Amino acid sequence: MPSRSRAAGPGLRAWAIWTVGVAAYVLAITNRSSLSAVGVEAAARFDADAATLSLFAVVQLAVYGGMQIPVGVLLDRYGARPIMTVGMLLMAVGQLTMAVSPSVGVAILARMLLGAGDAAIFPGVLRLIATWFPAQRGPIMVQLTGIVGQSGQLVALIPLAALLHATSWTITFGSIAGLGVLFGILVFVLIRNHPPDRDEDVSVDTDTGAIRVVTSSVDTGVGIRAAWAHPGTRLAFWSHFTTPFAGTAFVLLWGMPFLTAGEGRTTAQAASIMSLYVVVGMALGPVMGEISRRVPHLRSRALVLPTVAVQAVAWLAVIAYPGPAPLWLLLALAVALATGGPASMIAFDHARTHNPSHRLSTATGVTNAGGFLAALLAILLIGLALDLQGAGTPATYNLDAFRIAFLMQVPLWLIGSVFIVIERKRTRIRLGMDPPRAPRRRGG
């Protein structure tokens, strides 16, 4: 099979294809976060209580997570171009359905379509990076993709909310659907699965000349059991379970209602606080990545567990504050929550470190499931807690009810942290870094 010369780097075409792919990912993040700034309006439009509003986000994330394995299989068979195109069009159909939805049931179907389409985009971009860029540039390109992609949350928080307040629900979500169709066309016309000098999707290390077939799918049989059997994979799962869910629940659904209806902030103030969350998360990504690289054996103690503690302390401070929290404390909460996303990427370092290359996609899928499971639980538990207090609609939202509802996150932090400590110890024993535990002696 022909390949580029060892000295070759990515050309203009590779960068153009990545640019289209990452622009599609920005729009996917915008679609994913499109209820974040309009949650109160969505509750009013559909006359939905808090549990039902939670369901919009829960089914979207559940479908996203459930589609990861099928998407991996389809990417291996057909490549990134057709799968990403279908993903963009599915999101467009979902947003168009949301635009004209007359009922909760139809709106939930719309979010399911959105989750299914969203599931195809990031894995597709990762595959394009693997096939169009030298293998040794992969990690930095993945980081760059993640950082740029998060700007989609800013689009959802500010321009999307402004468009809704200036026009109507139908026009706003119909406009996003139109962008989805446009980007679906751009992806199909401009993206190619691999360079023309190759006849399949392979990754090439231009320093060593090593060629490896790119595999996206997850082994649902022996591979999952083998990956889970290694304590390093379980450490990755619980690290991803524990670090990002609070920020996800905040920015995906409950942050804006809490800040406006609970804390009494204006929509502009609330959008600024949530925008700070996004910007700080983008800025911290490279910093945490570099620290993780420098202290590979102290990642959990130096980064993951402190991040969990910072988030928990910030939330408890806001909850315990008598009356509405001052602006500086809410800004501090946004910064604290923003640490969760970059810290969660350390989980994938664990997965990559402790699994052979042929099992990496499987271990990554297992790890990713942890974060989505925790986010689903957090979003749903917060909604149920609001309903149980009789504060599940925009007319009944109040600060005290939100305070109790956000306490539902504490058990998730505690459970995750305990398992991080346990699996970290087991991983170090497995690697020979710590002595095995001595067996307990039975009493005579």
Image (spheres, rainbow, N blue to C red):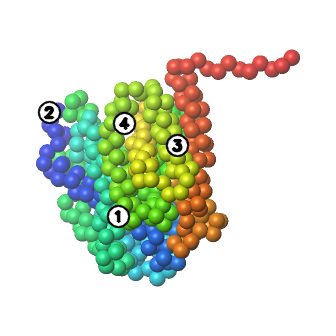
Q: Which residue is labeled 1 in the image?
A: 268
Percent across and percent down for residue 244 are 46, 47
Percent across and percent down for residue 245 are 49, 50
Q: Earlier in the sequence, mark 3 or mark 4?
A: 4
Q: Nearer the viewer, residue 93 or 84?
A: 93
Where is the C terminus found, in terms of image quarters? Answer: top right
Is residue 394 at all visible to an observer of this figure? yes
Q: Which residue is labeled 2 in the image?
A: 7
Indicate the amino acid at tag 3: Val
Q: Looking at the image, is mark 2 or mark 4 nearer the viewer?
A: 4
Percent across and percent down for residue 96 are 36, 76
Mark 4 Cα-neighbour bin, 10 Å: few <14, some 14–19, many ≥20: some
Where is the N terminus found, in terms of image quarters? Answer: top left
Residue 360: quadrant of the picture? top left
Residue 119: quadrant of the picture? bottom left
Q: Residue at x 46, y 27 (%)?
A: 298
Tag 3 near tag 4, CB within 8 Å: no
Q: Nearer the viewer, residue 340 or 15?
A: 340
Q: Secondary structure at mark 1?
A: helix
Residue 313 numbered mark, or none: 3
Q: Residue at x 48, y 54 (%)?
A: 325
Residue 134 numbered mark, or none: none
Q: Looking at the image, is mark 3 or mark 2 nearer the viewer?
A: 3
Q: Which residue is labeled 4 in the image?
A: 288
Q: Residue at x 57, y 42 (%)?
A: 416
Indicate the amino acid at tag 1: Ala
How far separated are the C-alphas under marks 1 and 4?
30 Å
Judge whether 114 appears above or below 171 on screen. above
